[in-house]
Image (cartoon, rainbow, N blue to C red):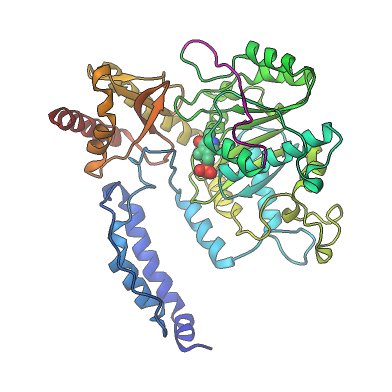
Amino acid sequence: MNKLLEEDFNNFDQLLQKVAIQGTAYFKNIDTEKTTLPVLNTIYEGLNKEGIGGLNTLKLFNKKFKDTIVASSGPRYLGYVVGGSTPAAVIGDWLTTIYDQNPQTTSAQGDVSVQIEQETIKLLLDLFALPHNFLGGFVSGATMSNFTCLAVARQWFGKQKGKDFAKNGISIPINILSAVPHSSAIKSLSMLGIGSTNVSKIKVEEGNRESIDINDLEQKIKALDNQPFILISSAGTVNSADFDNFEAINTLHKKYNFWWHIDGAFGAFAGCSPKYKHLVKGWENADSITIDCHKWLNVPYDSAVFFIKEKLNLLQLQTFQNSNAPYLGDPLENFNYLNFLPENSRRLRALPAWFSLVAYGIDGYKDIVENSVKMAQMLDEYITQNNELILLTPTRLNNVCFSLKDKNKQDKIPLFITELNKEGKVYMTPTVYRNTKGVRASFVNWRTNKKDITVVITEIERALKTTYQH
Ligand SMILES: *Cc1c(COP(=O)(O)O)cnc(C)c1O
């Protein structure tokens, strides 16, 4: 064995302890860490011939990079939709790495990792009060979950036309309807060969909504003249966290022939609060659902799930099966995840989610979700009473979308955001809502509390002053 490898193996406990001490310091003090830092100009020194061993590598990492790691999993990182990691999720993630399993098949002797994944899927279905008639699995993020669901939807569409797209490729246009799809759903359409521009836009409801206008949807369906189609609907749009009316969609779903997909990357978590679960009423009838775990479930990157109705298994298998690998056995006899999702080998992504779900339960997630919404409402109230700011959308759940009130000054939004983020105490990202430049703050982190909102407000006040000085 290589000498350095052997040394590291012998000192493994010390190496892990050092990392545990360093990691604990970061994890406990994250609210004093900066949310932004100037980007480093690192010097590439080349790959060394002999190596330096684990301990020296840790030292080098700390010297080169550690001080410029930003607190993106901390309580005031409100840009994009970025969750943190609960303590239990972190220990589950560490064990995922140590055990280094590859969840594939239940039939392999002595491998429990698929059972862990399937059990975690059931825990998640219970968290969202969804029935157990979905096949679920873990992928790297909601983008890949949308991709997975829409890939099976594509196969379904082909079947309606007597075609097997997975085998023979796409030979006819595929009808897609959507109102305010997430960019990753559109990206999935590009990756799937459906085409990112081949989406018929459904109107949104009146009154500053981002939800599907059901009448317009039915008009569009009728215009398709009984042709099958795929509907991409939303549980939580990114700007205003708006939800489509799933009960109304379900009524149409019974009447017309379409694949119904819900992107609920973060909005799905409304389903774990008695206060907000009305927003997802009727969603259990969808054919497929996308949910991110590295957002509101607060597990480390990279983690998301898809839920696809079990009765559509065969289409899912046709889409993802490894058809020229006889050593994998008959895919219908031996369940193997690699025949039901894009990746073949994967890490045991379910384990951090399993840990966090078991550790905090239904009540823990209800508290996380309701606290996030409360924090969003506090920011909303501040913006409402501030004469220089305006809300661009009502705060429906956990996202606050606002701008400068004076229309002539809205061009200064990029400058305002730069000023706001400059001190590294808060981080927000720009958006555009109905052609107006704005700022978006998304609350999904389990740690965010009232004190953080006070800091956020102080930073907004400071940024308003410095923006207008320019
Ligand atoms: C974040 C998000 C995605 C994409 O998720 P990734 O985890 O970045 O792949 C898709 N849909 C919605 C609604 C999202 O908020």
Q: Quadrant of the C terminus?
A: top left
Q: Quadrant of residue 122?
A: top right
Q: Say whether residue 130 is visible.
A: yes
Q: Is residue 224 left or right of residue 296?
A: right
**Residue 387, x across and y down, in percent:** 22, 16
**Residue drawn at the location 72% of the way across and 17% of the way down:** 221
Q: Quadrant of residue 262?
A: top right
Given residues 114 and 160, the one toward you in this image is 160
Q: How many marks?
A: 0
**Residue lying furthest left in this view?**
469
**Residue 286, x across and y down, in percent:** 70, 29
Given residues 434 and 65, the one toward you in this image is 434
Q: Is residue 436 left or right of residue 253?
A: left
**Residue 235, x across and y down, in percent:** 57, 28
Question: Above or below — where is 110 with respect to 332?
Answer: below
**Residue drawn at the location 53% of the way across and 56% of the way down:** 92
Given residues 265 and 280, the one toward you in this image is 265
**Residue 155, x across and y down, in percent:** 77, 39
Magenta stretch contains residue 205: yes
Question: Above or below — where is 401 with respect to 46?
Answer: above
**Residue drawn at the location 27% of the way across and 26% of the way down:** 411
Q: Quadrant of residue 204?
A: top right
**Residue drawn at the location 54% of the way across and 67% of the way down:** 98
Q: Say whether residue 363 is visible.
A: no
Magenta stretch mostly in which secondary structure?
A: loop
Question: Above or below — where is 87 with respect to 263?
Answer: below
Magenta stretch contains residue 69: no
Task: Write the start and end of the magenta stretch as one range.
Answer: 193-207
